[in-house]
Amino acid sequence: MAATGWISETWDRVVGSDPGLQRLRSALSAAVAMSTTLGIEYVYGRVTDRGPQGTLVVMLLGTMMAMMGSMALGDAAGARRKIATAVFFPVALGAGMTVGVCVAKHTDTKLAVFVAVMFVAVFIRRFGMPFFFYGFMIWMGYFFASFLGATFAQLPSLLIAVAIAAAWVLLLMTTVLRTHAQRTLARVRRAFGARARSVARVCADLLEADLRDARRLARLRRKLHSRQLRLAETALVIEGWSGTPGAIPQGFSAATVRRRVLDAHLAIDALATAADAMAGTDARHIADAARIADHLAGSDYDAAGRAARRLIDRYDEAGRTDPAPAPAPAPFPASAPASAPSSASASAANRSALRDVDCLAHHLATAAWEFTTLTGQAGVPDTAVDGEEVFEPAVTLAMGALPGSAAVAFSVSARSRWNPLGKLSLTTRQAVQVAVAGTLAILVGRELSQARYYWAVIATFIAFTGTATRSETFIKASNRVVGTLVGLGAGIGLAHLTAGHTYWIITVIILSMSCGFYLVSISYAAMIFFVTIMVSQLYSELHEFTAGLLMLRLEETAIGAAIGIGVALVVLPTSTRDTVYSARVGYYTALGELLRACAAQLAGEPAAEAPGLDAQVRVVDHRLQQLALVARPLTRPLVWGNDPRVMRHRLTLYAAVTRQIRALAVGPRRAPGLPPAPHLAAAARALADAATALALAPSPQSRPAAEVERALRAADAAMLAARPAPGTVLPAVTRPLLRLRQLLRELAVQGPAPETPGSAAPASRIVAASDGSTPSRSVGPRSTIR
């Protein structure tokens, strides 16, 4: 690989790993906010003559305020909205500090109120994202004041320090550190291109792999599936940012952006499907196909376009000179058994198979050529679709990223037959869990240390932050222990190096928190690793650092994590399987609605006052992303009685269904003038009924549920209703319908379903069989990706 290609792909990995550079911006914003606030609070402490200890206290308090404030104000909201959020920062932190001061001298009362404050901090999350941070500030304010023994005489100066930090971080986040929506959207779109090229890289590796190396082929196919899911997630982030005021550039509309991203997404899907089907074969054009994918992966679009055009022309020329192959056997069961094939029919079958593989290369080349064409037109406005529909994003972002699992688990009841609290909302149940876990952490933690037990309490409180199910709580609590354990060595080593050097200590603290912010969405254990380093530096500055102190922190953290896991499993638990079932119902429901909308379009019915097909496609994409998110714990050997291989296989099927429904929904738009097709519309409606039945069906069994089987048979009958002339090229939407029928049948049963007649190869066009009775798979010379 040339040096420029290596540099390009390395940069693609950096850009693709952080769509919109949101994590990097968050880390840098936190670093700037904390470092500058430290300086301001230092000046405030010196001006008010608070002494070294008092100055350190206000510096720590201000830094904590800056850290949380930079997170809370890091979105693209307008200045007025940020002011409305930030004005309550001192109120929340001050309320916690006031309560803490009131009970600081009464140990039993302090501990009881600590539990109550934890309950309130979690309970108020139900009122929206700002209250998530207000709850944290109330909790931190209480902890800061009560455990440091603040007095009423100190409270006014501490509140002034908080107000100064809040005002400063607000000024930063509305000026030099503000998030520019249009630039962020542009960066996310570049990340989409980077992830598309990463899919092309895996396609090239697949095509270049030795066909005898089955293990490598399987590993690359799993990698391809993962890259395609990441590409779909980036498309959803673009969808969310497109709904942000001021994000769309001049001359474009949000509908334009959505449509172009969807078209590019479909082209990459087609490229991956063709490469996946060609991998492991001895196709004549596999080297040419690999070269095209390699050019795409290296951002050499001109070369990719030229190579794709040559392959397409070569295929078309072969189609004009080669004799047409015999039609493939009918895909549905024949009424009489077939006789043994003759040598002539066998030869025709061989020619058909050869042309079928060549057709795959043609599809890959067509997809690559289409993607390069779309990329070349990315900066050209398309006024034909501007303003043609009111834009409502299919996903609402949380702090610039896709929402977490709580959006799905919010409507899931707890598994608690006897407890009437099981029907409470998720935030209320988590507040109860935090209160119970906090109480136990105080009781057990104090047995280990009367002074440092709060580390156990912190571990239990954080275990229920950003999690929804008991499996997620288990994973997060375990990662906290692992991160603390691994961070001990680094923390001890760095503490000895920076001991006595205040400025170096401050630098390490800021860098550690910045790295933690950057990695938190990738690995919570990595974030805690850096937090442990930060804690070591802090205690070094306070002249309290010892290796035994860090070991005590590890022990208390392990106690808190174990208590958090136990409470999550026993007290009002939110089942991972129940949450997956809820996400599955939402996915099938959205799929059924989109299939019915596609049926109306295929039937030529006038468009109803409903979201367009492009918007509904993104809704299905979002439901798939939610399903994959909440099912992630089931892809690991964590849950009792669960087979991770089965869940991974089913997620692959869901992703395949989503790719086919994209092609079905967009097909008529990309082939204007398509006449009404009542039989295809009837098939789409039947598949919609199958999706609805799957949403209501219990867990898959060895055979499809009766309602699902009935709907799938209706889809078969509808596909057989029309009898076109032999050799007629059927509409491009025929293939997605056939594939959807097969995939839904596989999803309706437990484990992989046997191949049933009627499924078309992913890269084949569909033509009528020679007897005109059934559609069949053809490998004719003209094949177009839709």
Image (cartoon, rainbow, N blue to C red):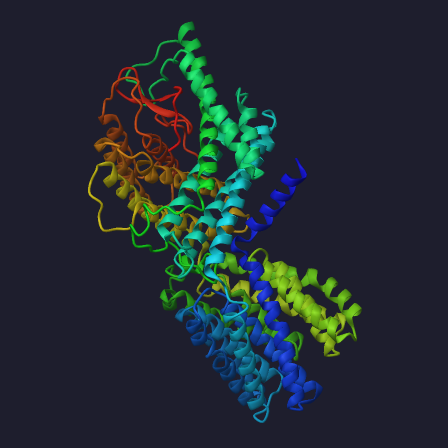
- What x and y, as percent, mark residue 159? 54, 86
Residue at the farthest left position: 606
Q: Is residue 63 left or right of residue 336?
A: right
Q: Is residue 501 above or below residue 241?
A: below
Residue at the farthest top position: 343
- What x and y, as percent, mark residue 588? 34, 46
Q: Is residue 113 above or below residue 26?
A: below
Residue 468 visible: no
Q: Which one is in front, 41 or 543?
A: 41
Q: Is residue 594 left or right of residue 347?
A: left
- What x and y, as percent, mark residue 230? 50, 47
Q: Which one is in front, 512 or 709?
A: 512
Q: Is residue 2 above or below residue 76?
A: above
Residue 140 visible: yes
Q: Which one is in front, 143 or 428?
A: 143
Q: Tell me the quarter of the picture where residue 147 sits.
A: bottom right
Q: Tell me the quarter of the picture where residue 126 sits.
A: bottom left
**Residue at the image point whose x is 60% and y is 32% from the top:** 215
Quarter containing the N terminus: top right
Q: Is residue 692 left or right of residue 182?
A: left
Q: How many numbered marks have been drawn onto this rendered protein structure?
A: 0
Quarter containing the C terminus: top left
Q: Is residue 16 above or below residue 670?
A: below
**Residue at the image point whose x is 34% and y is 36% from the top:** 670
**Residue at the image point whose x is 48% and y is 69% from the top:** 433
- What x and y, as percent, mark residue 153? 58, 94
